[in-house]
Amino acid sequence: VGSTGSAPLLREIARQVDVGFVLESSRSEEVITKSRKGADKYVMEVTGIPAHSGAEPHKGRSAVIELAHKMIAIHNLNMLYPGVTFNVTRLSSSEPLNIVPDVARCHISVRAYNEQGLSKAVKALEQVATGCSIPDTRTKLTRTRGRAPYTATPEILQLVEMAQEEGKALGLSIVAEGKGGLSDANLLMEAGIPVLDSLGPIGGGMHDLNREHLRVDSIPLRGALLAGLISRLCLSKFTGV
C-alpha cells in the first residue's frame, strides 16, 4: 500500500515521459478515472494520569476515555465537509488492566478531492485536539503529508476525450469518474505529468479477501482500449508529432 518501494522510481521515470497511464482495475468496461482524492495521515495521542483502577481510580485521568470522545467528534466531521472523509483506525493504549490508562493513540486517514479540503481537515482536527472532555489530559496531533489530489486538469480532460474516441471504435461509451481511493496516478501527477487512470481489467470487491476478484474475460477489450489509446497518443501533440 502506498507504492513505498516503487515511488522513487516512478518519480524518476516521470521526468522522462510526456504522459502516464495507470492500469488500476475498473468496475466497468466503460469506466476510467480522471481524478482521485488526495490523502493525509495523522496520529492523535492523548496523555492522561495513571492510577490504580481499584484502589484510587478517582486520582486517574483516562487517556482512553478522552480519546474516545475525540474519535466520535472526528467521525462526526464526515457530515460537515462535503467530499472530505475522516477515517479513525489503528488504536492503542497502555495495557495493564489494573491501571487507569495514561496513554492512548489513534491513527486517522483524511481524504479530499483538493488541497482546500485537506486544509479544512487540518483546522477541524486541530480544533478537536484542543478540546478536552477529561480534565488534566493533554492531546498531541501529528500530521504526515500523504498523496496530493489527482485532479482533472485540461490536459487530463484531453486524454479523456482521446479515450472516449477510441472507445467508440470498440463499441464503448467511455465515462470518466472521480474516485476516493489513491493510486500511482496521484504520485505521477504530483511529479508533473498528465495521467489517465483505471485502464486495467475489470474487477471488484476491493480489500475484501472473500470478494475481491478480476474478470479475465475483460482483459482483451481493455487491452484493445489501451493499445488504441497509446496509438492515438503517439500521433498527438503530447509527443510533438
Image (tube, rainbow, N blue to C red):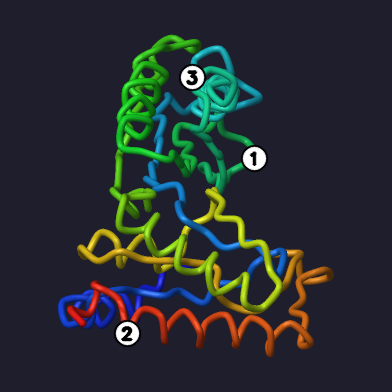
Which of pointers 1 and 2 indicates the residue nearer the eye? 2
**x 36%, y 66%: residue:** 195
**x 54%, y 74%: residue:** 166
Spatial distance from mark 3 to mark 1, Cα to Cα? 15 Å
* Count of numbered badges drawn on the protein: 3
List the residue tagged with mark 3: 61
| Relative to 107, residue 3 above or below | below
Q: Amino acid at mark 3?
A: Arg
Query: Percent position (x, y) of residue 150?
Result: 37, 53
Instruction: Name the residue furthest right.
Output: 210
The reply to whether callout 1 and callout 2 are in contact (CB within 8 Å) is no
List the residue tagged with mark 1: 97
| Relative to 152, residue 129 above or below | above
Spatial distance from mark 3 to mark 2, Cα to Cα? 65 Å
Mark before the other along the chain sequence, 3 or 2? 3
Q: Amino acid at mark 2?
A: Cys
Dot 3 falls on a residue whose secondary structure is loop
Left or right position of 144 against 49: left
List the residue tagged with mark 2: 234
